[in-house]
């Protein structure tokens, strides 16, 4: 018996989203479904983006949060490059589904992040490294959802051939919840940099 997890072909995700989907129960008892973004979900993604509070946007800014951006992501869906993992819950008697978390994973390294890591003497690899920007809807933060989503991704990313996960644009030093969250999942702090008027940490985790 081999302990190597069964590999997933990233090229298959958009046609067969089920291969990277799963479901969990939140500590509150509510069921949550983890699925990658599909091309026909621009309205739901836009609703999530525009719902984010100023407090969340202050610490989370991988891209603009408007309907136009959601439309663009759905029109140009390509999970071989960027995996947009969503958490969905069912609400109301009708069981209408709503997005309550959005974790972006670029399967590779962004130019700005690479530059900072290289200045630290750390070489990053597009084929085996990946880059994370996570967010949870305001009403669901600090209730265990992010941790369940993270566990889902940590199980998945090695199966997509990824060996390390780094933070997209680092994490603000004045975001102690996020720093705690990353540390809990094995991220280590490798550097500091100034941006957005504050100090930020570069953090990276080994996946294998
Ligand atoms: C960061 C984020 C993704 C985490 O998801 P989440 O669902 O809130 O996380 P969880 O509830 O699973 O875990 C939060 C942890 O932080 C801890 N925590 C909460 N507030 C904290 C604080 N002020 N300081 C330190 N730790 C804190 C909780 O106790 C919990 O730790 P535990 O599991 O060891 O008990 C989410 O809070 C979020 O979207 N925040 C706003 C956007 C953001 O900061 N994104 C990251 C940008 S780099």
Image (cartoon, rainbow, N blue to C red):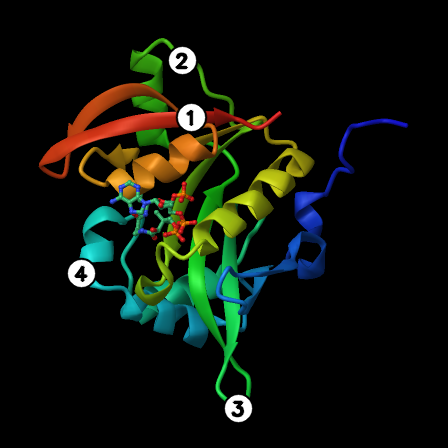
Q: Residues within 10 Å of mark 2 (few under 14, many from 20)?
A: few
Q: Mark 4 vs mark 1: which is more N-terminal?
A: 4
Mark 4 CB near ligand 1 (8 Å cut): no
Which residue appears at 44% of the width and 51% of the height? 146
Farthest residue to the front: give it.
Answer: 28
Query: Where is mark 4, residue-wise?
Result: 54
Residue for badge 2: 122
Residue linked to disc 3: 93
3 or 1: tag closer to the N-terminus: 3
Residue 197 in view:
yes
Q: Residue at x 66, y 59 (%)?
A: 17
* Spot occupied by residue 65 in the image (x, y as percentages of width and height): 29, 62
Q: Which residue sits at x=53%, y=69%? A: 30
Q: CA distance from mark 3 to mark 2?
A: 52 Å
Q: Measuring 12% from the left and 34% from the top, which residue is drawn there? A: 198
Picture disc at residue 22:
none
Q: Is residue 80 visible?
A: no
Cβ of mark 1 under 8 Å from ligand 1: the answer is: no
Q: Earlier along the polypeptide chain: callout 4 or callout 2?
A: 4
Query: Residue 180, how many percent across, how many down?
Result: 34, 36
Of callouts 1 and 2, the N-terminal one: 2
Label 4 to label 1: alpha-carbon separation = 27 Å
Residues at discs 4 and 2 in contact (Cβ within 8 Å): no
Q: Nearer the viewer, mark 3 or mark 1?
A: 3
Q: Secondary structure at mark 4?
A: helix
Which element carries disc 3, helix, strand or loop?
A: loop
Inter-mark Cα distance, 3 to 1:
42 Å
Check disc 1 and report the residue beneath it: 204
How many numbered marks, from 0 up? Answer: 4
Contact between marks 1 and 2 (CB within 8 A): the answer is yes
């Amino acid at each position: 018996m081999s302990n190597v997890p069964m590999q997933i072909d990233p090229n298959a995700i958009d046609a067969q989203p089920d291969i990277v989907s799963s479901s969990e129960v939140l500590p509150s008892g509510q069921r949550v479904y983890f699925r990658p973004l599909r091309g026909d979900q621009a309205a739901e993604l836009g609703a999530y983006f525009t719902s984010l509070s100023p407090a969340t946007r202050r610490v989370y800014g991988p891209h603009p949060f408007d309907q136009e951006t959601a439309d663009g992501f759905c029109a140009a869906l390509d999970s071989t490059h960027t995996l947009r993992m969503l958490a969905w819950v069912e609400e109301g008697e009708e069981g209408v589904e709503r997005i309550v978390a959005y974790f972006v994973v670029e399967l590779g390294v962004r130019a700005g992040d690479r530059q900072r890591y290289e200045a630290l003497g750390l070489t990053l690899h597009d084929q085996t490294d990946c880059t994370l920007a996570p967010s949870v809807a305001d009403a669901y933060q600090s209730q265990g959802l992010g941790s369940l989503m993270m566990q889902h991704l940590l199980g998945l990313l090695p199966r997509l051939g990824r060996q390390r996960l780094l933070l997209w644009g680092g994490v603000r030093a004045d975001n102690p919840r996020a720093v705690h969250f990353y540390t809990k999942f094995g991220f280590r702090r490798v550097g500091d940099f100034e941006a957005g008027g504050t100090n930020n940490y570069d953090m990276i985790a080994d996946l294998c």
